[in-house]
Image (spheres, rainbow, N blue to C red):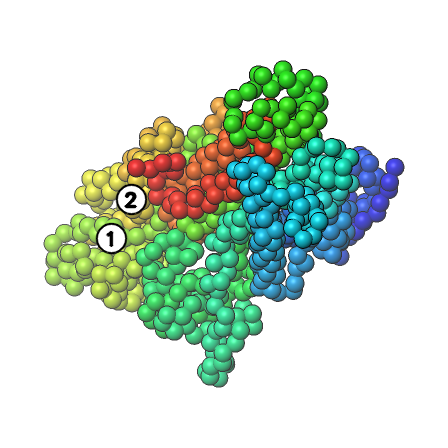
Amino acid sequence: MTTRTVRLDIGGMSCANCSATVAEALEELDGVHEADVNFAADEGYVEFDEDRTSLAAIRDAIGNAGYDLITEQLTVPVTDMTCANCATTVAERLLAVPGVLEADANFAADEARVVYVPSVATPEIIYEAVADAGYTPVRETTDDNGRESAAATARAAEIRRQRRLTALGALLSAPLVGMLVAELVAPGLLPETVPGTGLSVGWVAFALATPVQVLLGREFYENSVQALRNRRANMDVLIALGSSTAYGYSIIALVGLLPNAGLYFDTAALILTFITAGNWLEARSKGQAGEALRHLLEMEADEATRLREDGTEETVAVEEIEVGDRLKVRPGERIPTDGVVVEGNSAVDESMVTGESVPVGKSPGDEVVGSTVNEDGLLVVEATKVGSETAVRQIVSLVKEAQSRQPEIQNVADRISAYFVPAVIANALLWGVVWAVAPETLATAVDGLAPWGLAAGGPSAVGVGEFALLVFASAVLIACPCALGLATPAATMVGTSIAAENGVLFKGGDVLERVQAADAVVFDKTGTLTEGEMTLTDVVPLGPAADGGSLARSVSDESSLLSIAAAVEDGSEHPIGTAVVAGARERGLDPTKATDFESVAGEGVRATVDGRTVRIGKPSFVADAGADIEPARETVDQLQSEGKTVMLVAVDETLAGALAVADQIKPSAATAVKQLQERGLAVHMLTGDNERTARAVASEVGIPAERVRANVLPDEKAAAVDAVQADGTQALMMGDGINDAPALAAASVGIAIGSGTDVAIEAADVTLMRSDPLDVLKAIRVSAGTLSKIKQNLFWALGYNTAMIPLASLGLLQPVLAAVAMAFSSVSVLANSLAFRRYTPDHDYRLFRW
């Protein structure tokens, strides 16, 4: 039993009771001997038996106690994984590193993602673990741009290396192909020896094939040895077996140990050449799958114009910008970093972040996103986020994490891949033996099925042993675990990139899969279906005719009533008051100054205007002043039935009119609800508003009254989502506020809008960069399209192996053709995934669209 003591950094503790709570939670774990936690240092020391508990269990115990174990995440580019089994090997080796809590390796992305405890593990230890597994990590630099460049450089170098090897293999194999064709077209045409040398043609073939074995075959043989050391057979084992079988057999025949046996140097060389060519095309395709993210990073500004305190300007690198710096952004320039406009007005093209092509107007107080383009006005922006905290960097980070977290459907492929290679080798051995034992019987059964088979006339044409050996080589080479391993991650990479380009960010491939399986969508009302801001909608004068007093005359029309109301509300900070003042200014009115302002919580406000007392608020508040509100009853009922908040205005003791404000429904809300319902999803709405307002909004957007819940308190929203899911329904919850966070976490998939709070976005599984309900449709469409593409890939990968392995086992394929087919299968799966890049989520994905 191994006992370890580790130091852990713990966040969220504020007193001695907190540290005691954490210590108690840890000591309750089976296998923990002692836990000493210090809140002042935000750390703890834990002694535990590794055989009985783990750091993951310790993390969960700290989390369940209400605190956080401090962890870090590292993405490690890995340049030489060749199949899904390689990725599994890397992940298993990383998980064995003390301090590593989570590890995933993505063969399609050529990288591994690791979550680790920094007080226990370090990046260097993680890099060494990858290297110990037999693969090459690209080490992180201190600069994010440098790291991206290092990964891109390594990827480009690998593509160039595979291309050079392919060219070399083709050059050396071309004479072998010429010799083979000559022998097939005109048997006996080739001389037995090379004129003037005395060397047999076989030795020439040996001289051409051997460099191919050494130079192209080296990595396959080395990787095979490493895989067997790791006790996991991968694709390289199959290639090494097939190629070395043909090459070794030919050498034995060439030196005379097998008289009259054929030579297959051409087969051995062509196998490696075709597989290497496939790897080259595969590397190119994998590079293209990540182009969207690299393009996003390349669009970042390199320099910025910073304003000094004395008003002068200086040009600085973007990396030198600090929070609080003021930056001048001229028309046509990229905004250097996330910030807020402090001077100027302009339109900004935010399409690279939101997918929205229409430029967005910006004025002082508005937020801007780094890397977006300032269209036509001069702006001064104060930096609020820099470096890795900017929206673009967060998008890239989130998409990369999503690409590393694979859908559950990947587990099917992983389980198959784990047993695939051993099963293929066993099958090849079995059929090699069967052909050796009963050659004529099998030859008779398959005769004429495939003229392109191993030999015209079957085993009798080349000899029983030779034929059995060729069947073994073909059966080994035809199998392709690569296609199976690429099916899911390749499609996931493309799908998450498409989503990001259209302003939809998935936190993981598993989330990507769950979205399309939803049965219902639950919308929070405020800020999601509505704009989230009160707007003045109605101004209705209701007072008596002018009686000679200046103030009485002033309420005889809408402009006068609104001007008086705005004068009173100008002293209020309540959203309703703000809406009234904004409405007046939008109509060109300049409110006069009121005095003696007073706010009555939950009721209304009062102030003095031109010596008269003006009250604005609930009908009961105005009635308390002695005003007769009966003439306003019909107006109030009508406006409230439309989901508006109504306030009455009284001058002294006389009713003057009514004002109505409302949280305007977003223009696309009704369309979104309709299209979701057309897809067969049940649409629900939750709100803390009153029943009348809730039903009015629901009616306008098309949500049935029975699926509306009003007067829902913030802490009741999660329970409301649970109620929707109680019968097994999988619900998407869309919200934007802090009070939506529990509900977002409770839903099968939580969706936060990008204009919402950080807490909501953190709790959600999907983030929509725009505040548009229609983008929920985009998320669903990308999810459904990606899963459809994954299923296509798995169908072709499994179908290919199901059809081809029996053909090779029955002697109906030449080893060279088997190698070509093997290389083609992986490339075809990648090509199918890359074809998905042209998809836009404005419509449902279809394999064929006419």
Q: Which residue occupies the foreground of this view, 81 or 734?
A: 81
Q: CA distance from mark 2 to mark 1?
A: 19 Å
Which residue is pictured at 18% across the width and 56% down the height? Answer: 558
Q: Measured from the top left, where is residue 731 in percent x and y?
A: 46, 33
Which residue is pictured at 65% across the width and 42% down the height? Answer: 192
Could you classify mark 1 by the number of other residues whose Cα lies within 10 Å: few (under 14), some (14-19), or many (20 or more)?
Answer: many
Q: Nearer the viewer, mark 2 or mark 1?
A: 2
Vertically, is 87 above or below 450?
Answer: below
Residue 100 visible here: no
Question: Which residue bears the numbered disc 2?
Answer: 644
Vertically, is 229 above or below 400?
Answer: above
Give the total of numbered labels.
Answer: 2
Residue 786 visible here: yes
For this orientation, the residue located farthest to the front is 196
Q: Measured from the top left, where is residue 262 in percent x and y?
A: 67, 34
Give the SS element for disc 2: loop
Residue 650 marker? 1
Residue 299 marker? none
Vertically, is 485 above or below 320?
Answer: above
The N terminus, quarter of image: top right
The C terminus, quarter of image: top left
- Disc 2 residue type (three-letter): Lys
| Residue 755 falls left or right of residue 420 | left
Q: Quadrant of residue 56?
A: top right
Which residue is pictured at 68% across the width and 20% down the height? Answer: 434
Q: Are marks 2 and 1 in contact (CB under 8 Å)?
A: no
- Disc 1 residue type (three-letter): Ala
Which residue is pictured at 46% across the width and 37% down the height? Answer: 789
Q: Which residue occupies the foreground of this view, 392 or 619?
A: 392
